Amino acid sequence: MTNKIIIAISGASGAIYARLLMDKLLQVKEQWQAVGVVMSNNAKTIWKEELGNEDYKNYPFHFYDKNEFDAPFASGSAQFNTMIVCPCSMGTLGRIANGLSDDLTTRAADVILKERRKLVLVLRETPYSLVHINNMEQVTLAGGIICPATPSFYSKPQTIEEVASTVVDRVLDLAGINLNSFRWGTNSR
């Protein structure tokens, strides 16, 4: 199956992760057939606040409204095989963990889990409460992957973008996308 990817951007802090994720997907266009994006209202506000622009509007992906339940990936028959929620707020995690399909993000996540496809949640908030940990367990037991936005420093990143890229590169690895990125045990990126 060719990669058909859903990107959901919640209102958690970390718009840089969403921007880098979309930038990197554009660099590997040959590895995906379709990318659908859904952003919460808060995600748009956070993007503007943290990145100082509304450049998400310039990406060549198909953007869907958070209540657009006739989006292709609201059904398993559309065969979107990977969903990345980046960044993922604890509220979004809680709704996904408990099967509350109250918007397109949570409906798409429910579809991905029921179809036994790949769901990666890039959690952004700390510290975690027991409620958060239990919700992470529920998603993990359902087949999802919890990938906190915790950067690594093996590659000796020098800029904020390079630090954030250590998270995004890991997320794309988990999604099955091949990147030319830092690999432990090598000296090259």
Image (tube, rainbow, N blue to C red):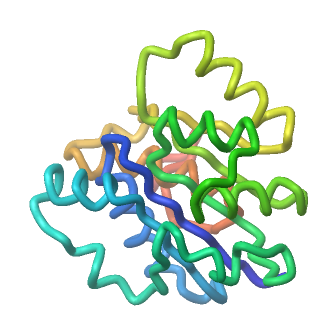
- The percent position of residue 61, horizontal first and vertical second, equals 46, 85
Could you tell me which quadrant the C terminus lies in?
bottom left
Taking the spot 31% from the left edge, 41% from the top edge, the residue there is: 13
Q: Position of residue 30 (x, y in %)?
A: 61, 89
| Above or below, comparing residue 39 to residue 133 in the picture | below
Position of residue 53 in the picture relative to residue 90 (left or right)? left
Q: Position of residue 110 (x, y in %)?
A: 76, 55
Residue ranking furthest to the top = 130
- Residue under the point 83% across and 61% down: 117
Question: Is residue 127 toward the left or the right of residue 77 in the image?
Answer: left
Q: Nearer the viewer, residue 25 or 36?
A: 36
Comparing 179 with 98, the one in front is 98
Q: Quadrant of residue 142?
A: top right
Q: Is residue 34 above or below residue 165?
A: below
Q: Is residue 53 above or below residue 46?
A: below
Q: Could you say which is closer to the camera, residue 176 or residue 16?
A: 16
Percent of width and height locating residue 169: 50, 54
Residue at 49 percent of width and 58 percent of height: 181
Q: Is residue 9 left or right of residue 175?
A: left
**Residue occupying the point 69% across, 83% down:** 72
